[in-house]
Amino acid sequence: MLSAGVMALAASAALAADMSVPPVAPPPTYAPIATPAPYYDWTGFYLGGNAGAAWVFNNGTTSTFAGTTTQEFSNRSFWGFAGGGQVGFNWFFLPSFVLGAEGDFSALTNKSTLTDFSATVSQTDRPQWVSTARARFGLTADRWMWYGTGGVAWSEDRITRTQLVASASSSAPAGTVETVNRTNIGFAVGTGLEYAIMSHLTTRLEFLYVGLGNQTYSFPVSMTRSTAGFDSIGLVRFGLNYKFGGGDPLAPISARY
């Protein structure tokens, strides 16, 4: 009796082993969610310095005495160094644009001395500084930014007039030296390329053209008035900026929406 029960139990176990087990369904799979690419954030205030070369040009100079105007000097251009600083703000927005504003100041070393056609007067032109207030619009590619810029410009000139010999075109005696300063207002346009070398440090190469129009200087002793035809200043300079805010990627680009 006992052996029959054991045999029946063994047969049941063998039968259970022969039965096929249904496959277990694998867990569902999901496609990975794409993470938006990070960005370099150009937004923020910045402060920096600049240095480079300055080119000054004027389209001839005339002199007026007792109502009579004569040509004193022909066209001239002269080079010098420029150095100063800038402060500004950038706002970066998608997909790759930057709007900003900047103010800058550069001292100039340009100097030119000429003797007039009649060899009676010499005049020294010494631009002192140039300053601008400009808007900027940039296109970015990660850490690179190309930008165009334009706005208002100011410049100060120091003109020294020396009467070499007495002349009917001047009331000043020989040896008279007169110096006048004048602040001029015009426009500035330019372009540049900027690169973020560190999270909060950028460097740039920039070109600016400053147009100042005709400039008139009055000399009280000689009772003459000199007019320089359309003064202009060209600036090619390197810059280094420290930027507050923005910087390296901290969030996906979608967070800018």
Image (tube, rainbow, N blue to C red):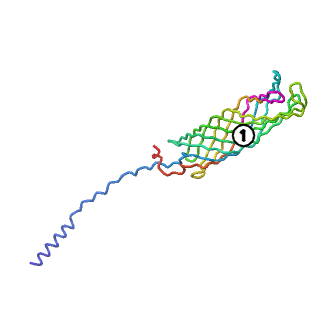
Residue 178: quadrant of the picture: top right
Q: Secondary structure at mark 1?
A: strand
Quarter-wise, where is residue 207 in the image?
top right
Q: Is residue 48 above or below residue 124?
A: below
- Packing grade of label 1 (10 A; few <14, some 14-19, many >=20) is many
Residue at the limit of the structure toward the front, as seen here: 221
Q: Residue at x 51, y 42 (%)?
A: 93
* Residue pictured at 83% horizontal, 30% vertical: 221
Which quadrant of the structure image shows residue 167?
Answer: top right
Magenta residues: mostly which secondary structure? strand
Residue 143 in the image: state x and y as whole percent.
Answer: 57, 47
- Tell me residue 198's x, y (percent): 59, 52
Which amino acid type corresponds to the residue marked 1 in the rendered image? Trp
- In-image side of 61 versus 137 (left or right): right
Residue for badge 1: 129
Tell me the quarter of the image containing the C terminus: top left
Disc tally is 1
**Left or right: residue 243 compared with residue 177:** left
Q: Position of residue 168 (x, y in %)?
A: 89, 24
- Residue 91, placed above or below residue 225: below
Q: Is residue 105 left or right of residue 5?
A: right
In the image, taking residue 257 as reference, residue 125 lies left or right, namely: right
- Relative vertical location of residue 154 with respect to residue 13 in this rendering, above or below: above
Which stretch did the figure color magenta? Answer: 218-236
Q: Nearer the viewer, residue 4 or 101?
A: 101
| Residue lying at the far left of the rendered structure | 1
The front one of 45 and 236 is 45
